[in-house]
């Protein structure tokens, strides 16, 4: 209905331009919203107020001209001008039934639109370091990013999903020596595990696989490995020790063997991450390698571009980006004293690469602990000559797990799960995906494991899925009775849907397209979960209050059309969240 009214207003504006009442070059977005108070109509627009200055007319006078130019339409019962120039629309009550016809006609396409205008959007999410399995914190970012991408596609954007593989930094070297030390221990060498190494069971598994495949090809005496290394924690500095161990591993193994251990760890963990995300319903168009970025010279290229623009300077042997001149709280190092580029330098190069690939909007989904990183990356965008608004960073808070009222310790030693895979195995993909996006991403969330697996109305995902399954059950009962659903007869008799529960469902169904558009525009999939819970609640109330399979053919078919519209809308909404719509439960 909003789109219909917007089209009427656009026709009115064209008529006024032709008549010379307003300038022909004037362009103002035509927006229609639902009226907050039904006494003021069903829909309203502030178009006259927004256009008054460029049109050269007082708002109320312009509103009168717009109303006079509106083409007649049977859907619009009355149009009124209120206050300084608001235009209120009163809709013919019979028009509310058209939503059922529309849903049945559009099916899976219902709720999709072209409001995004084909805008090219790059969304990068999760991008966890490939140094260990995904944990439950990554799960919330995965569910949020995937749902936002789906919503943007639903409104007509061209969406590219990407995972940035941080495979070029120091953490990957720490992982490599962690695997190598475990490998040496498995080979019988007596050497301590570094205090700053990766201790997870997955490291042991990778080391064992390395030994099975290559035997003792990477074995060296412990004494040779440890000779002359600085003391490790607690007596010494764990950072200095791990850096010295990395250097020793490079020297003793040589380039080829070190690379083999490195690649074995990367392939194993990245393969595990891919498998986890695919099982979680998350897909990517590209897994972008940081090492590939470095080897292609893109980091050097980005720094040269900043240097040519006068944004770099030397101090204390390091290269600094003058980000404070662009609004950052202080300048940032991009090349350390030892000549190594920083993570920030790689991020600048990566975002330059995104821009050069022709995307209109870049959306990065980060953990909330990275909030301080946003301003410096925005300044880099400006220094590269791009509008900072082309980069949009969405922060996702961590999820806290509970079993009922008891908080689950986030520790491997506690014997409780911490990985996304373990969460998925315990509560299922559907519950995890739905629960993760029930609240605003920037808000803390408590994830109740017991609630997520319960088959009760208190479980939101169960409540919504059960509404879908209940509709399917009604149609199975219809077949068992030997009756046939006559869709056309039902459409002709929708005026029989006069019960309060039916009117409430019709109104809710009509709001689905605008809910999808608003959730996409605001990057807030929780708005969709709230809508689905509301629609499911209205249906369950209707189900408990009325009989659908009545003897009267016309009323039965009208009600069946209505609940089929409910089922289709729930299925469409759940699909945007990558949650299944079961036919039985």
Image (cartoon, rainbow, N blue to C red):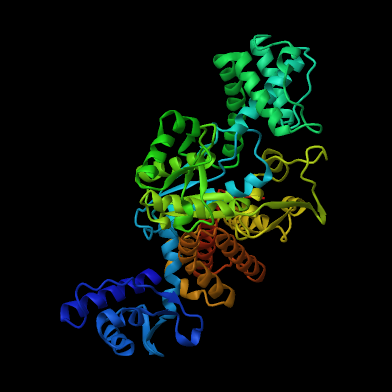
Residue 455, image x and y in percent?
73, 54
Q: Give the camera-side residue of 94 and 477.
A: 94
Does residue 333 appear to the left or right of 467 in the view shown?
left
Q: Give the camera-side residue of 173 and 342.
A: 342
In the image, residue 442 sits, relative to residue 126, either above or below, namely below
Residue 360, image x and y in percent?
37, 52
Q: Residue furthest front?
A: 316
Question: Residue at point 32% right, 86% down?
Answer: 63
Q: Give the camera-side residue of 543 and 186.
A: 186
Residue 11, image x and y in percent?
25, 74
Question: Residue at point 55% right, 61% down?
Answer: 528
> Quick one: quadrant of the N terminus?
bottom left
Instruction: Specify the quadrant of the image occupied by residue 268.
Output: top right
In the image, residue 580 sits, relative to residue 184, either above or below, namely below
In the image, residue 488 sits, relative to residue 82, either above or below, namely above
In the image, residue 147 sits, relative to residue 512, either above or below, namely above
Asked whether residue 479 is in view, the answer is no
Instruction: Specify the quadrant of the image occupied by residue 207.
Output: top right
Question: Residue at point 39% right, 89% down?
Answer: 84
Does residue 125 appear to the left or right of 384 in the view shown?
right
């Amino acid at each position: 209905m909003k789109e219909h009214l917007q089209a009427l207003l656009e026709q009115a504006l064209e008529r006024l331009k032709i008549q010379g009442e307003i300038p022909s070059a004037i362009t103002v977005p035509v927006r229609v919203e639902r009226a907050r108070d039904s006494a003021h109509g069903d829909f309203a627009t502030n178009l006259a107020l927004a256009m008054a200055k460029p049109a050269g007319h007082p708002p109320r006078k312009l509103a009168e001209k717009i109303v006079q130019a509106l083409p007649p339409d049977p859907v619009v019962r009355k149009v009124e001008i209120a206050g300084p120039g608001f235009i209120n629309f009163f809709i013919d009550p019979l028009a509310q039934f058209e939503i059922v016809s529309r849903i049945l006609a559009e099916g899976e396409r219902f709720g999709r639109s072209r409001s995004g205008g084909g805008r090219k959007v790059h969304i990068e999410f999760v991008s966890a370091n490939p140094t260990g399995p995904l944990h439950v914190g990554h799960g919330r970012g995965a569910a949020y990013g995937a749902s936002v991408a789906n919503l943007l596609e639903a409104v007509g954007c061209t969406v590219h999903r990407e995972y940035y593989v941080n495979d070029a930094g120091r953490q990957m070297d720490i992982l490599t020596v962690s695997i190598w030390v475990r490998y040496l221990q498995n080979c019988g060498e007596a050497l301590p595990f570094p205090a700053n190494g990766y201790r997870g069971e997955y490291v042991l598994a990778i080391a064992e696989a390395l030994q099975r495949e290559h035997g003792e090809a990477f074995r060296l005496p412990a004494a040779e490995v440890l000779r002359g290394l600085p003391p490790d924690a607690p007596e010494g500095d764990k950072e200095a020790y791990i850096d010295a161990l990395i250097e020793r591993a490079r020297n003793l193994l040589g380039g080829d063997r070190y690379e083999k251990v490195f690649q074995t760890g990367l392939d194993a963990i990245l393969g595990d991450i891919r498998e986890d995300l695919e099982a979680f319903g998350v897909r990517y168009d590209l897994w972008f390698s940081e090492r590939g970025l470095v080897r292609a010279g893109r980091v050097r290229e980005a720094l040269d571009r900043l240097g040519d623009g006068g944004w770099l300077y030397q101090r204390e042997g390091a290269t600094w980006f003058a980000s404070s001149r662009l609004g950052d709280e202080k300048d940032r190092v991009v090349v350390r004293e030892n000549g190594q580029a920083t993570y920030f330098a790689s991020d600048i190069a990566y975002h330059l690469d995104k821009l050069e690939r022709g995307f209109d909007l870049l959306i990065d989904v980060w953990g909330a602990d990275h909030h301080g990183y946003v301003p410096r990356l925005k300044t880099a965008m400006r220094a590269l000559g791009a509008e900072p608004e082309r980069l949009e960073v969405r922060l996702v808070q961590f999820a806290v797990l509970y079993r009922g009222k008891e908080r689950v310790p986030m520790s491997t030693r506690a014997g409780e799960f911490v990985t996304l895979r373990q969460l998925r195995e315990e509560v299922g993909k559907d519950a995890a995906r739905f629960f993760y996006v029930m609240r605003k991403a920037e808000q803390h969330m408590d994830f109740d494991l017991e609630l997520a697996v319960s088959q009760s109305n208190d479980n939101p995902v169960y409540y919504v899925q059960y509404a879908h399954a209940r509709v399917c059950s009604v149609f199975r009962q219809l077949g068992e009775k030997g009756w046939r659903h006559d869709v056309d007869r039902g459409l002709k008799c929708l005026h029989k849907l006069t019960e309060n529960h039916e009117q409430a469902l019709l109104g809710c169904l009509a709001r689905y397209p605008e809910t999808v558009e608003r959730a996409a525009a605001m990057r807030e999939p929780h708005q969709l979960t709230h809508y689905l819970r509301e629609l499911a609640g209205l249906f369950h109330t209707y189900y408990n209050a009325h009989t659908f399979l009545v003897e009267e053919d016309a009323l039965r078919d009208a009600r069946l059309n209505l609940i089929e519209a409910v089922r289709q809308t729930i299925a469409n909404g759940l699909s945007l969240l990558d949650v299944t719509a079961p036919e039985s439960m």
